């Protein structure tokens, strides 16, 4: 069995910087990229990097939690677990064992918009990786025992990562309030009562429909030649039959939101109360990314740095009304996303006072506009992150996979860094005025009940809330 582990939840600040960094990791001028499509519809990207004799193989499926049929939430994530069961050629768990014996490592994850499987090995092991990955694309063998044991693993994971974490429960409730009609309102890991009822038939229906070459993108990055990759891809993936009549990727969309939604979540385990507000916001659209780029920069200007951002400077260091404050946005999603703000009140400041202070400073910022020196610094930092990201072939390849399974194109990925650099302060303010409308928002308070004893002085330092669904899983 592959070892399953949970990555620590990213803080909002870290998630925002990571999104910005990854978003600039694939400039057109420096990527030696070759693309082609197999006869069965599988898209292939080859990203050459000959600095080390290492290769990363990634297979990205254009399906995630938001593509699940009603009533079987969690089946996409659940099936990611099941992909490490056996085939006619491999015993359960043998896939990861073989990768490890060949000096490599493997990963997988499920999100709202994609499910992906990665291996990193010496470049002379690429053919073996392709053979094994292609084998399980259509050849997985499951039985009732697999279903029961792995379903229990998922339920235990939900207990550990969601039920035992008030911040995760709060995030789940806020997402459900944010999306009345979009499937983004359900958690990646699934609602508990639906996960408990998942069947072998549910899993196999999902597998047969979505795990197909015409619904997948193969990315091979590292010390390889495009002709070599094409030969191997045709040999192993090209012979796999596509899914006939693959469902069009059309999801229910949100109705117009006419009034702010608010919730208060109380839990005696909460050590640090905070306010978080998320607004529905446009994502990066193919060929039209300027609004998304302006929102990315708005998040950096308002709350990207705990030392120099607008909200931190005003509320942490000048008025001292906040312990921390942040802003976040990640536009790489298939459907509309969110722009978020969060603040933790300083001692002696109530949640209402903290929320009012945050609103006061946002309004003042929109009136005075962007400080050009600050914007220049942020753009310089983003450009530097683009250069640093070139050191990681895995990160560069992941940018393409994330974007292409979210509806963007290779050209969109390559244009994005320059678009970010071209955004003006006026565009940032205009995007803020467009999105930061309380009628289009969900505001949540997380706090302990009034009669809960105060935490001891030795209590663990508060963690900034996760910007995204914490149920996205990674395997290694």
Image (tube, helix red, strand yellow):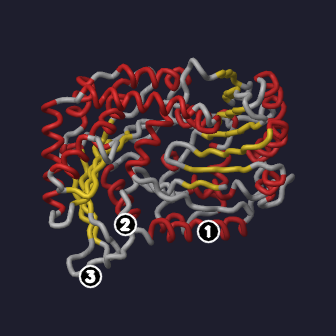
Q: Specify which label sits upstream in the sequence, 2 or 3.
A: 3
Is residue 394 toward the left or the right of residue 452 in the image? Answer: right
Q: Specify which label sits upstream in the sequence, 1 or 2.
A: 1
Q: CA distance from mark 3 to mark 1?
A: 34 Å
SS at mark 1? helix
Which quadrant of the figure contains the C terminus?
Answer: bottom right
Task: Name the residue carrying label 1.
Answer: 153
Q: Mark on residue 322?
A: none
Classed neighbour count for the residue bearing mark 2: other residues with Cα under 10 Å, few (<14), some (14–19), many (≥20): few
Task: Name the residue carrying label 3.
Answer: 453
Task: Name the residue carrying label 2.
Answer: 461
Is residue 393 toward the left or the right of residue 413 in the image? Answer: right
Residue at x-position 66% and y-position 50%: 107
Where residue 132 sits in the image (x, y, percent)? Answer: 80, 45
SS at mark 2? loop
Q: Nearer the viewer, residue 403 or 352?
A: 352
Q: Nearer the viewer, residue 16 or 337?
A: 16
Q: Quadrant of residue 215?
A: top right
Q: Specify which label sits upstream in the sequence, 3 or 1.
A: 1
Where residue 372 sits in the image (x, y, percent)? Answer: 26, 25
């Amino acid at each position: 069995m592959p070892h399953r582990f949970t990555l620590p939840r990213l803080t909002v600040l870290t998630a925002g910087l990571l999104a910005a960094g990854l978003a600039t990791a694939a400039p057109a001028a420096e990527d030696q990229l070759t693309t082609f499509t197999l006869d069965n519809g599988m898209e292939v990207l080859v990203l050459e990097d000959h600095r080390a004799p290492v290769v990363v193989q990634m297979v990205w499926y254009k399906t995630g939690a938001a593509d699940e049929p009603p009533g079987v939430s969690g089946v996409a994530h659940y099936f990611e677990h099941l992909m490490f069961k056996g085939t006619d050629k491999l015993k359960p768990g043998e896939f990861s064992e073989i990768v490890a014996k060949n000096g490599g490592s493997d990963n997988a994850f499920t999100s709202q918009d994609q499910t992906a499987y990665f291996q990193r090995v010496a470049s002379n092991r690429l053919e073996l990786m392709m053979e094994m990955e292609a084998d399980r694309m259509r050849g997985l063998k499951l039985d009732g025992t697999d279903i029961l044991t792995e379903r229990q693993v998922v339920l235990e994971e939900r207990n550990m990562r969601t039920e035992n974490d008030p911040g995760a429960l709060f995030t789940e409730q806020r997402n459900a309030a944010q999306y009345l009609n979009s499937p983004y309102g359900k958690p990646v890991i699934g609602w508990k009562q639906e996960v408990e009822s998942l069947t072998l038939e549910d899993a196999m229906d999902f597998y047969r429909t979505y795990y197909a070459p015409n619904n997948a993108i193969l990315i091979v990055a590292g010390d390889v030649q495009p002709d070599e990759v094409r030969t191997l891809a045709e040999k192993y993936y090209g012979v796999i039959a596509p899914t006939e009549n693959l469902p069009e990727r059309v999801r229910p969309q949100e109705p117009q939101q006419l009034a702010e939604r608010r919730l208060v979540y109380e839990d005696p385990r909460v050590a640090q109360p905070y306010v978080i507000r998320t607004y529905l916001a446009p994502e990066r659209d193919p060929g039209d990314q300027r609004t998304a780029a302006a929102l990315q920069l708005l998040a950096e200007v308002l709350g990207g740095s705990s030392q120099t951002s607008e909200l931190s400077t005003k509320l942490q260091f000048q008025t001292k009304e906040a312990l921390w404050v942040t802003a976040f946005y990640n536009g790489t999603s298939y459907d509309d996303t969110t722009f978020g703000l969060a603040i933790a009140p300083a001692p002696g400041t109530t949640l209402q006072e903290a929320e009012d202070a945050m609103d006061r400073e946002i309004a003042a910022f929109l009136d005075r506009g962007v400080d050009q020196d600050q914007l220049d610094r942020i753009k310089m930092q983003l450009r530097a992150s683009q250069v640093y990201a070139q050191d990681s072939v895995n990160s560069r390849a992941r940018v393409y996979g994330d974007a292409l399974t979210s509806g963007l194109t290779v050209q969109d990925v390559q244009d994005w860094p320059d678009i970010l650099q071209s955004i003006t302060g006026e565009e940032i303010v205009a995007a803020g005025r467009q999105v930061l409308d309380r009628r289009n928002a969900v505001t949540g308070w997380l706090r302990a009940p009034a009669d809960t004893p105060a935490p001891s002085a030795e209590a663990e330092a508060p963690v900034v809330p996760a910007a995204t669904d914490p149920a996205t899983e990674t395997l290694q």
